[in-house]
Image (spheres, helix red, strand yellow):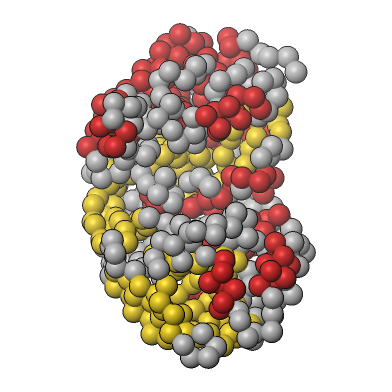
Amino acid sequence: MRLVPFSAFFVFFIIFVAACAVSVPTVDVVSDTAAISRLKSDVAWLADDQRMGRKPGDKGYDDAADYVAERYESLGLEPADGDHWKQEIKFRRITTQPNSAHATLTDKAGAKIPLTPGKQFNLFPGSMEQSVTIDDAPLVFVGYGIHAPQFGYDNYSDADILGKVAIITNGAPTEFNRDQKNYFGSTSHKFEAAREKGAAAILFVNTKSKPDAERAPRVRRAFTQWVAQDGATSKELLPYLTLRNDILAMMFDGSGYSVDEIMSDVKNGKWDEKNIQLSTRLSLQGRSNQEFFTSHNVVGLIEGEDPVLRNEVVVLTAHLDHLGVNDKQLAQGKDGTYNGAMDNATGVAIMLEVARMIQYGQRPTRSVAIVALTGEESGLLGSDYFAHYPPLGDKEIIANINLDMPILLHHFTDIVGFGAARSSLGETMENALRLSDVEPAPDPVPELGVFARSDHYSFVKQGVPSLFLWTGFSNGGEEAFRDFYKNHYHRPSDDLTQPILYSQMARFTALNTMIALEVANQKARPSWNQGDFYGELFGRAP
């Protein structure tokens, strides 16, 4: 595939925006050095050590949010709610209180066997109460823990787990397609299904992990959720634990089933849905520490010109947060700052440049919201909160275009559009790619489940068609991606020493601008494709 020179790429952009009846000042689309300079400056500021890794609740993130708000104002955007650039979100961070975890197994003969924390079990107390006490609860093995009766599969169809400990494994049955496996096989779905069925706690078994004869598998060290003004929260997490394999085998003693055979069937996707009521029981105790803090989404608005369609909003998003600093590494004189240059200072910089291109052109038909999000690294929390409580008045979100960690280390010739095959946004993307002589490419890393791992997914869960672009694997893209993912992703080395190609950032910016403008100006609002899994699952399929 021929690589289009940078200036030629913007010629395509001019043709495109003319077709959309949108004019953009020549200086913004032709002066590549000016665009590159702005992109580079934004990345440099956001990924500087002084931002301290932009962790929500810390000064570095707050400073970054102020910077974005100032950039919105300088571009002439409007505060989305008419008064404030920032959408304040209250968060609760939950960690296990040291030395608080206790567990006792009652075997089939009624003998009490105390378990050693860290070695024989690990416990996370959950998010529903600060302390958990479960006394001699029955144990029920429910296989994959999948509740999908609409697809003819339900591990809970004849299981009574009310007040009991549900034993759940990773994975999904072989008869599920990739979408079904990605969604129903996620721990989020499994934990939510167990909670809705009334389980007191979850014992999670990961058949992918290597058995350790000395220690139980780790559980999460912290869990963060948003807390709304009306008292609602993001997902609640039941108490859950992991066990060493020999303790798990002890639990199944007397059940008539071999743990090794069960886990082999599970690992191979062949568990047949039956649940097993065990004759052993479990008691648990634990406490959590809870810390409250606030952080902000930063929201600007470009008001549409059509008096009716301006109430429909295309939302552009990029997460502003990253992982903060590792104080222990810093104390040892090592690099302990997680600057997040590629993840996701680049995405925020691109979003700001897209906003500039749209703002300085002819006003689009629909409104466009520009949103820098907090809490992505903690579980898509900022986007989830925004999707539940959009500060847009009576306006309705009709589409989301997300920018997150595009790999800009090579001259890209193809683009992966996560979500493109699911809605009419795919056709919009292909129009832009044709004009830019860039090829569409399939998901090159389906094993990573990227579609459910970035902020666009929060909008998908509200039924909103969404699109998320990555540079593809052609022309050196695979090598660039795999090197970054292996050596720099979520590491201090994702900093300003990354050899980011800012000319490619500008090309990527133009592509996303083309797409955003077409969505904002086309006659019909985006729609899910008939029969799409997520469109039907979340209720807005035609």
Q: Quadrant of residue 305?
A: top left
Does any portion of residue 196 appear in the rendered image?
Answer: no
- Quarter of the C terminus within the rendering: bottom right
Q: How many numbered marks have been drawn onto this rendered protein structure?
A: 0
2, above or below 401, in the image:
above
User: Extreme bottom residue here?
Assistant: 109
166, above or below 429, in the image:
below
Give the image location of residue 152, x and y in percent.
72, 74
Which residue is more in the foreground, 217 or 9?
217
- Quarter of the N terminus within the rendering: top right
Residue drawn at x 67%, y 44% is 446
Which residue is more in the foreground, 58 or 227?
58
For residue 177, side relative to residue 102 (left or right): right
For residue 398, side relative to residue 417 (left or right): left
Residue drawn at x 32%, y 33% is 329
Give the image location of residue 515, x and y in percent.
57, 33
506, above or below 530, in the image:
above
Residue drawn at x 33%, y 27% is 334
Q: Quadrant of residue 428?
A: top right
Give the image location of residue 518, x and y in percent.
58, 34
Which residue is more in the foreground, 133 or 51?
133
Q: Quadrant of residue 59?
A: top left
